[in-house]
Amino acid sequence: MYKNIFLGIILYFLTSSLIAQNQDKQASFGINIEISESYQFQESQHKGEPKELFIGLIFAPFAATTFEGDPPFSTDTSLFLTAALVKGDWSIAPYYNFGTNSAGAFLTYNILDELGTYVSSDKALTGNTGTYALGFTTPILEDYIQGYVEIGGTYGDDATAFFGVGLYFNILKSVKSW
């Protein structure tokens, strides 16, 4: 099971990276040489992008439906304590989820300015359960509120698949940039 999850995550990031590269190529072929040169200049700037560390809370109300089990539809909220390391379009954010008493991490990638994607996984600190998810986000209020759609599941004692939608309210502070 873990091998399948790991392979799915790798394939997911490869696919999203190829989508982003394909969109960049289409933009540079379709217009003129100046845009292509501008793109190359921007690419060289991305190699030395600064890193930034954010610490704070993420409040996440959501609604989910399970593909099996009872109840088929539920709503809940989560509060995450997180430290996010951001570099360019990528970020990794280990977190503690107060709602489920679990620890995990988000790995995110911004495909476009208006579309991001992530994988997340966590494990309960007491017990044999956890969750994994693949999601897409879009900014609603830039840097503060994001809408998301995710598909994932739980593993352990009560394994179920789910589809969820919700919001991320980011209460994050930049503490270091280098």
Image (cartoon, helix red, strand yellow):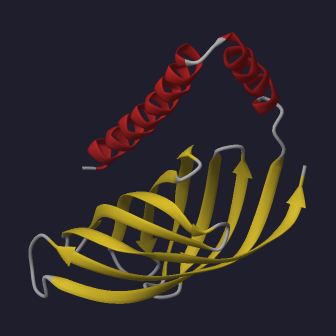
Location of residue 172 with respect to 51 vertically, above or below: below
Q: Residue at x 54, y 14 (%)?
A: 29
Q: Nearer the viewer, residue 170 or 78?
A: 170
Location of residue 8 with respect to 175 vertically, above or below: above
164 horizontally vs 40: left or right? left
Residue 157 location (% of width, % of height): 22, 75
Which image quadrant is residue 161 in? bottom left
Residue 92 location (% of width, % of height): 62, 54
Q: Nearer the viewer, residue 99 or 170?
A: 170
Q: Outermost residue, front direction?
A: 31
136 horizontally vs 163: left or right? right
Q: Residue at x 64, y 44 (%)?
A: 89
Residue 86 location (% of width, % of height): 71, 52
Which image quadrant is residue 68 in? bottom left
Location of residue 92 with respect to 72 vertically, above or below: above
Q: Nearer the viewer, residue 164 or 131?
A: 164
Q: Residue at x 50, y 33 (%)?
A: 20
Residue 70 location (% of width, % of height): 10, 86
Location of residue 69 with respect to 109 vertically, above or below: below
Query: Number of labelled discs?
Result: 0
Q: Residue at x 13, y 88 (%)?
A: 71
Q: Outermost residue, top direction?
A: 33
